[in-house]
Amino acid sequence: MTRVSEIIAAKSQQFQAELEELLVHPSVKGDEQGLRGAADWVARRLSALGAQVHLLEAGDGPPVVFAEAGQGPRSILSYTHYDVQPPDPLGEWGSPPFQPTLREGKLYSRGVADDKGDVTARIQAVDVYREAYGELPLRLKFFVEGEEESGSPHLAALAGRYGEMLRADGALWEGGSFDEAERYTFFCGLKGIQYVELRVRGAASDLHSAYAPIVPNPAWRLVHALATLKDEHDRIRVDGFMEQVRPPTEAELAYIRRIPFPGDAMKKMWGIPEFVNDATDQQALMRFQTQPTCTICGLRSGYTEEGEKTVLPSSAMAKLDFRLVPDLTPELALELLRDHLDRHGYGDVEIVPFAGMPAARSDLTAPVVSVAAAAARAVYGHEPVVYPTHGGSGPMYSLVQGLGIPGGVMVGVGYAGMRLHAPNENIRLADYFHHIEFLVEFMRLFAAG
């Protein structure tokens, strides 16, 4: 056992207790007390490092907690968030979602994997580093926000206002984990997103379905409009959409080809017989990494309760998200969608835009990428799996590419069974403590540069 792992083992009960202190705050959008409680806890714990803490107020939203620890010529921006997803449906939890519960080596609580485990692990890693090696030889800039699960609506403005203070030589993002084959996996970018509602209106109120021969049905109108967006082979047919997709670089392709995609394990875990279009693992991986998406996330119209009710709906609504790749910006996606619907005769279909974020993709030759890989090899004992991009979205662009930071890597405390955004969210405590060790090694190697 190394000096670092000995220190972590000696402090494990303290570290777990601190994590649980943060987890009890129900920091869900709309719960001002829960959000403020979580922000205050993070601010106090960062103050205990001797850091000067700043609360960066984000409009009418919860504050960003910013602090800087250590000193040296190199710097790292650490991005995490203290807000969490709603815990619904509550009936599917094995224990109360904001009452951390340990079962068989796994800690269950809403937000433990996304993202409070990353928040506390990075703070605790500074304590461990100092005890093992002395003062932190780099400047670690903590940026802990409270609106990630709401689309980070104020983050771009904050990045513009405090850019000089936030700029660094690399970024540690949240979100890495062990995959289905127990390989440590991290990501070097995120897809963008544009979330929308499509709305269609018909009669002033729901009518008896006997009037269907003469009264337009907005549900059918919406279905027909949706059918123009994708074909039966899952190809996006929004006019001009796919023409905006930037081909992957040779460096990105080289990384993708080295990814051991666990297709069979994924299909088994998700309970599906095959990928879309019965794609091979390599085909599925390439689509996952390089292609945008057009996804119907929900539909609502008319009567949807148990039993029957013969009704002609007065309105219909669909929620969609478009996951975006570099060059296909949220603004451009909205423009192309509007033009497409108008061109195909669906000018009456209303588009209501929600969260939008551009895609972020790091320079794969940036030091932060190679150092993260070296730290993973040293701590986990195997070559990590490196994805050029993650299939999900987040505000990385504003804080990394937007500030000229050469690269960011998504590293975290998770594993394949952590149940992100679902009931019974959990992490394995052994992973949590190993991740603290990984962070200490990363800081040591990055500072040595």
Image: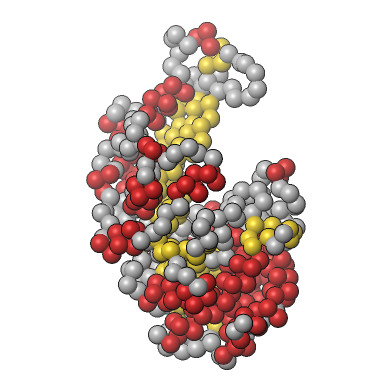
Q: Is residue 321 left or right of residue 236?
A: right
Residue extending furthest toward the bottom:
134
Residue 270 in the image, given as x and y percentages of width and height? 53, 43
Q: Is residue 215 left or right of residue 246?
A: right
Eyeballing the image, is 139 above or below 244?
below
Residue 192 in the image, given as x and y percentages of width and height? 40, 53
| Coloring scheme used | secondary structure
**Residue in view at x 35 percent, y 30 percent:** 232
Eyeballing the image, is 212 above or below 163?
above
User: In the rendered image, which quarter contains the C terminus?
Assistant: bottom left
Q: How many marks?
A: 0
Residue 182 in the image, given as x and y percentages of width and height? 53, 61
Quadrant hosting residue 122: bottom right
User: In the rendered image, which quarter contains the N terminus?
Assistant: bottom right
**Residue in view at x 57 percent, y 65 percent:** 413
Eyeballing the image, is 428 above or below 265?
below
Q: Is residue 314 left or right of residue 25?
A: left
Q: Is residue 19 left or right of residue 288?
A: right
**Residue in view at x 51 percent, y 36 percent:** 298
**Residue in view at x 50 percent, y 49 percent:** 265
Q: Is residue 432 visible?
A: yes
Residue 235 in the image, given as x and y percentages of width and height? 32, 37
**Quick one: 246 or 128, which is closer to the camera?**
128
Q: Is residue 56 visible?
A: no
**Quick one: 443 or 309, which is closer to the camera?**
443
